[in-house]
Amino acid sequence: MKFQNTAILSLGSNMENRMEHLQSAISLIHNNVATVVAVSGIYETPAFGFEGDDFYNCAVLVHTCKSAYQLLEGIMQAEQEGGRIRSTTERYSSRTIDIDIISFNNEIIAEEHLQVPHPRMQDRNFVLYPLRDIAPHWEHPVLHKNVSALIAQNSESPCGFVMKLPAPLAVLEPHRFNYIAIEGNIGAGKTTLAGKISEDFNAKLVLERFADNPFLPKFYKDQARYAFSLEMSFLADRYQQLTDDLSQFDLFRDFVVADYHIFKSLIFSKVTLSEDEYRLYRKLFDIMYKEMRKPGLYIYLYQSTDRLLEHIRKRGRSYEQEIRAEYLENINRGYLEYIKSQTGLNVLIIDVTDRDFVNRQEDYMWLLDQINTKAV
């Protein structure tokens, strides 16, 4: 499952403090447009197509939930804030900052105001050299040649390497936790957040297999009849999945992020089961829970009931459309009461009711900052 789009941007500056312009533009993109996950070295090249000072050029790889056109709007705003003044008469001119979309996933876009891959990138070493730094195996979707082959066939003079910019600007420090579990009510956005973090920070992703549970649609139609079957099925599946996934060490991933933890079974079962059923269920849960690895950080995403219902309606799962506000409120109350009772669990409660960490990069950066603050 892919949660975000991947794009490569080319940046250039040949006015005033070129390095400062590049660094400011990258920071602005990261904090306001898309998550910067890789930055190339800086290369110096002569101005192309006009008389002007030499350019500093680099490339960045970004992740975003935005469409290609939304990304274009964002980088044009970044150019404007960086002092770029577009000429209506000259095609080439000196500029404080120039940002182009070189690639967007593996898509081919040929529109009046957006062409991807950039139509002249294969002829520009000041694009290809930085691109090779951050995506050495990238292949042109039209020419079907990788970046090294494009450089080899290009007659343009090689670029002069200047320096390597600092590492990617990501603000999360996952190594402090090793294992992060993200929880929340139905529709709170826990899976989306876990997916974004896993892609941005090289984490092993563990997602709850709720869609495979045959009792879930039946439960939403007849809760009293199917509650115990559903909760027992969930408990067994969660225990098996977490035991398997957390025991397997992945040499190529920096940490683990999951969109649930097993104690959510206790929260939902307390709401849905009768007293006798819950007592039996709790005995089985306690036996399993003692054997489970505990997360280094447990995040609870809080959303107001109205927002939860809005999200549930938008994602359109037929079996969820009859969920009542009272049920969601009981689940939320159960989470908060349980969290308060836990002394050995490192818990971070984040209210995201008025945040949109999918469509607003600023909100995503704010959320990551909340996580980092917990690590201090």
Image (cartoon, helix red, strand yellow):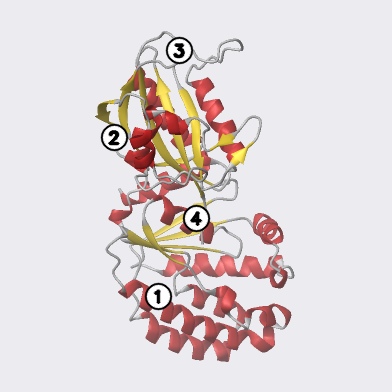
* Residue 193: mark: 4
Q: Residue at x 59, y 69 (%)?
A: 331
* Quarter occupied by residue 56: top left
Query: Distance from label 3 to label 2 (Cα)?
Result: 25 Å
Read off the residue under disc 3.
Answer: 94
Task: Report how far apart the C-alphas of labels 2 and 1 lie in the structure.
Answer: 36 Å
Query: Mark 3 or mark 4, which has the lower sequence index?
Result: 3
Sequence-earlier tag: 3 or 2: 3
Count the marks. Answer: 4
Q: Residue 353 vs residue 320: left or right?
A: left
Of residues 13 and 25, the one nearer the viewer is: 13
Q: Residue at x 50, y 68 (%)?
A: 337
**Distance CA(mark 4)–CA(mark 2):** 26 Å
Residue 66 in percent (x, y) is at: 57, 43
Give me the disc on residue 166.
2
Q: Which residue is mark 1?
A: 242
Element type at mark 3: loop
Question: Which of these two is toward me, 27 or 373?
Answer: 27
Q: Amino acid at mark 1?
A: Leu
* SS class, disc 4: helix
Question: How many C-alpha atoms fall within 10 Å of the one at disc 2: few (<14), some, or many (≥20)?
Answer: few
- Nearer to us in this view, 79 or 352: 79
Q: Is residue 238 above or below residue 170?
A: below
Q: Closer to the camera: disc 3 or disc 2?
A: 3
| Residue 375, position as x, y percentages in the image | 32, 51
Indicate the amino acid at tag 2: Pro
